[in-house]
Image: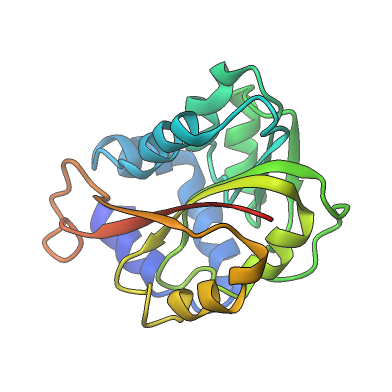
Amino acid sequence: MSNKKGLQDAYSLVTPEDSINLYRTWASTYDSDFAIQNDYRSPFEIAKYFDKYSNNNDTPILDVGAGTGLVGERLKFSSKEIDALDISPEMLEIARLKNCYSKIIEADVTKRLSINDNHYGAIVSAGTFTHGHVGPSAFDELLRIAQPGGLFVFTIHNKLYKKAGFDKKFIEIQKNITEPKLHEILVYGNNPDENYGNDKVIIAIFRKK
């Protein structure tokens, strides 16, 4: 699968089943053909902002939409427990082989998760809140499983921030979270795709009250 086809397919997903089917065929080459070749920046930036805003109480960590473990690889030196959650078993198998996660969880984040209330001290995510993937309604479930004071650090595609209602969702849940800090970054450092090479994401950081 070429870079261009991969990005087009990823952005055109509609259902969770679409995600499962795409990433089944993309898992084995995702890191080399997509992340490395395009200098996919989001996992690095998530790790950077997590390090900036986190403290020793922000554990365990849940990596939502963990995929092949690109975020986990960059957080594994934090000495904190990190779990991976993704809908694709094939992507999770690649992540498991990197030995950076304590637990692998195959689940659909748009549905209720088999995770206790107030369990995680931090929730991170890169590339999940984007075209064809997960919308802002997932925040409710993620807030349920986060500890009071839990840290959130995740990307939202900038073209979807208002279009998909992430801005309205932040207003809806404002009594349950600290005021979000928003940082806009370029997604790719070296992307030859003329359609997506200049894509940006918003990194959102807040804590559950």
Q: On the rendered structure, is 163 left or right of 86? A: left
- The quadrant where residue 182 appears: bottom left
Residue at point 37% right, 74% down? 160
Of 62 and 106, the residue lying toward us: 62
Q: On the rendered structure, is 151 left or right of 37? A: right
- The quadrant where residue 29 appears: top left
| Residue 121 screen position, x and y as percent | 71, 40
Look at the picture and state if 76 lies above or below 136: above
Residue at point 59% right, 34% down? 95
| Residue 175 screen position, x and y as percent | 64, 69
Task: Look at the image and name its color scheme.
Answer: rainbow
Of 145 and 113, the residue lying toward us: 145
Look at the picture and state if 89 lies above or below 142: above
| Residue 34 screen position, x and y as percent | 32, 44
Residue 135 appears anywhere in the view: no
In which quadrant of the rendered image does the C terminus lie?
bottom right
| Residue 109 screen position, x and y as percent | 68, 63
- The quadrant where residue 93 appears: top right
Please tell me how many numbered marks the rendered image carries: 0
Residue 44 appears anywhere in the view: yes
